[in-house]
Image: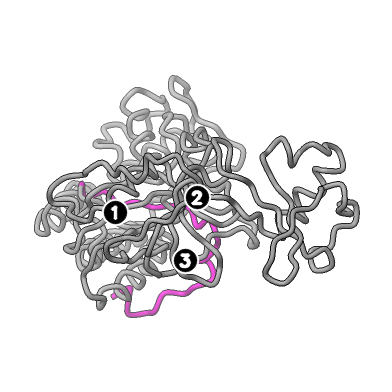
Amino acid sequence: MNVQARLLLLPFLLLFCASAWGQTKTFVPAVQIQRLKAALQEYQHLDEDNLWTTFPNKTCLRPGEKDPLISGLRTNLFLMGDLPSLASPTDSSFDELLTQAVKKFQRRHGLEADGVAGQATLEALNITPAQRRAQLALNLQRWQADSSRTPQPLVLVNLPEFMLHLLDSTGTQVWETQVVIGQTPKIYQTVPLESKISYLVVNPTWTVPQSIIKREIAPMLKTNPQYLAQNNMVVYRLQGKTRVPVSPSAINWENFDAARENILVVQQPGPHNALGRIKFMFANQHSIYLHDTPAKSLFSHPIRAYSHGCVRVQNPEKLGAYLLDQNWADGLQPAKALQQTSPEKNFYLPKPIPVKLAYYTSWVDDNGEVQFRRDLYQLDALTTPQPEMFQ
């Protein structure tokens, strides 16, 4: 079967896999295993056909332009099914059909869908079918590791996707929202983990980690002595288990030593609190939790890696309502507890709900489209797929 015939059949094959399992079941391991195996076969064919084009660095191809490289752009997008036809493989013009194909490719790769083949888009296009096949195999391995787990409701945060998915006990998605995760330096990365959300805190205080005091707040105070007051922060010295308020001027910020000073910096509840109005608590050794944020503008960015390690949730009130009233089949009910304006208060869930911070960089969605995401934390690069994943 030639390349064009195979590409015409691929979406139907993957859609068949999707329809066989029903709607909105993208994150059911058994579904992903079936879909990824089909995608692996197609990317093997793409690798064997050896028709892939790579692009020079610092290239930018824009709609309306003519450039010899555009014919290669057309070929790659056609091979992946983003461009529906290749009537003229040598066409070097960037027309509307090609613009829409670039946007589709960008959406499948978590990039800004502006239709311009800029640096980030061409970097993704320069990843060869052989490399994508390895990425698919590695993620197939991850999904297979999840397949033996007992089905149960789940808060799934897929870190490379910058999304939170709320799944019911069948694995069907109930709701989703955007998230912001940890920055790419190792000290700030959000660690993949599994736990159970047991309670949430409304109007939380924020106890600033010692590492942030040392790296960010202490240097800031050298140039702006009013920084703590401006941000509603209070300094305490620990005496045993007792917090004793102290004046910021009594601390040697110039040569701050967390162990010697034995202090805490606590931001009080309020509209500018770094945790927003709600935080969601689950046991883990990395002090990671989900929380609200006052920095709402960051959710408009396609790549949302800005935090110090915790996960910021775009719609925390809605997540809280789902977790406090777990009869999801009856529809979402407003949670009065989340509207209270009193000081910090804990609300325990009727039943703890599992949470998984996952690292899936490829999957096949319910439209039969293969999704890829950047290996933001280089965890793919550190792992080699088992040989049987390619079979």
Q: Is residue 89 left or right of residue 30?
A: right
Q: Is residue 314 magenta?
A: no
Horizontal and vertical percent for residue 10?
Answer: 20, 52
Q: Is residue 386 magenta?
A: yes
Query: Which labelled disc corresponds to residue 344?
Result: 2
Mark before the other along the chain sequence, 2 or 1:
1
Residue at screen point 82% across, 43% down: 221
Q: Nearer the viewer, residue 6 or 388?
A: 388
- Quadrant of residue 50 within the rendered picture: bottom left
Q: Which corner quadrant holds the C terminus?
A: bottom left
Horizontal and vertical percent for residue 232?
Answer: 67, 40
Describe the element under mark 2 as helix, strand or loop: loop
Judge whether residue 9 can be spotted in this image: no
- Quadrant of residue 152 within the rendered picture: bottom left
Q: Nearer the viewer, residue 171 or 258?
A: 258
Mark before the other along the chain sequence, 3 or 2:
3
Magenta part mainly helix, strand or loop? loop
Query: Which labelled disc corresponds to residue 324?
Result: 1
Question: Which residues, given as a range, are shown in magenta?
Answer: 367-391
Residue most extreme to the top: 64
Vertical relation: 303 (above or below) 309:
above
The residues tagged by marks 3 and 2 sit, at their Cα atoms, a distance apart of: 28 Å
Foreground: disc 1 or disc 3:
1
Vertical relation: 363 (above or below) 331:
below
The residues tagged by marks 1 and 3 sit, at their Cα atoms, a distance apart of: 24 Å
